[in-house]
Each structure stands twice: as structure tokens, then as C-alpha cells.
Image (cartoon, rainbow, N blue to C red):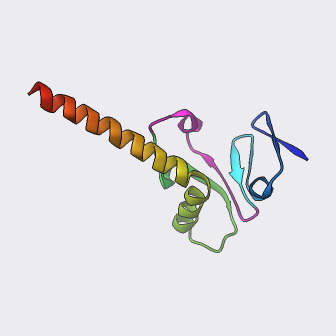
Amino acid sequence: METKINNEFYFDSEWNATHQVLDGVYGSSSYSFRFKNPAVQKWTSHIIKPSDLKVLTNETGLSLADAKAKMIDDWFAEDNEDTRERNNAKARERRAKQKEVS
């Protein structure tokens, strides 16, 4: 079966059955959230942090801070790590160039 998410079709899978994105709202059976600033989703060098999220529902039994940490781990952990590595590599290159110039 296919599911329409963000105007794209995806085939249902184990991941898709528990996590969904509909009209900018991310969620699972125990929580839902959206970005405070929707533009964050398109930023390529931004690491998603708890202050970026607006929690709509939290039925996890966790505090708001712990729930946000779980949401970030569930949805953005891999992307955040990739972004962190890319940002660090760019910073190392920039510092190396500055060192060569001085």
C-alpha cells in the first residue's frame, strides 16, 4: 500500500507505519510535533535542536525536554550527525586556508 506524505508517495513499511509526516506535522502514535520555523527543514547546515520543535502532543510519559530529545533521536539523529561532520570538515578547510595566508 502507498501513503502520500508531503505530496510524495511512499510505500508503507515498518518505519512508515509508526512515523508519519502530514502537512508539516511529524508524529508517531505517542507524539506529534512541527517546526517552529518551517524554513528550518530546508537549511542544509543546521543541526536540529529541541528549541526548533513545537510539540503538539506528548503521550510518551516523558517530560517535554526528554520527549523533544526522543523526537530528535527518532527523526533527525542521522541527518544531524551528517550535518555536524560536513560543518566540521568545512571549518577545518577554512582554518587551514587562514593558516596558509597568515
Q: Quadrant of residue 93?
A: top left
Residue under the image location 41 percent in, 46 percent down: 84
The image shows residue 50 at horizontal and vertical percentages of 50, 55
The image shows residue 54 at horizontal and vertical percentages of 59, 51
The image shows residue 65 at horizontal and vertical percentages of 51, 65
Is residue 92 rendered to the left or right of residue 23? left
Tell me where the magenta segment starts and ends, as one range: 29-45
Name of the residue lying farthest toward the right: 1
Query: From this viewpoint, is residue 24 visible?
Result: yes
The front one of 49 and 82 is: 82
The front one of 20 and 97 is: 97
Is residue 51 rendered to the left or right of residue 93? right
Q: Quarter holding the C terminus?
A: top left
* Residue 31 located within the stretch drawn in magenta: yes
* Residue 60 located within the stretch drawn in magenta: no
Residue under the image location 53 percent in, 62 percent down: 69
Is residue 60 rendered to the left or right of residue 87? right
Residue under the image location 53 percent in, 38 percent down: 40
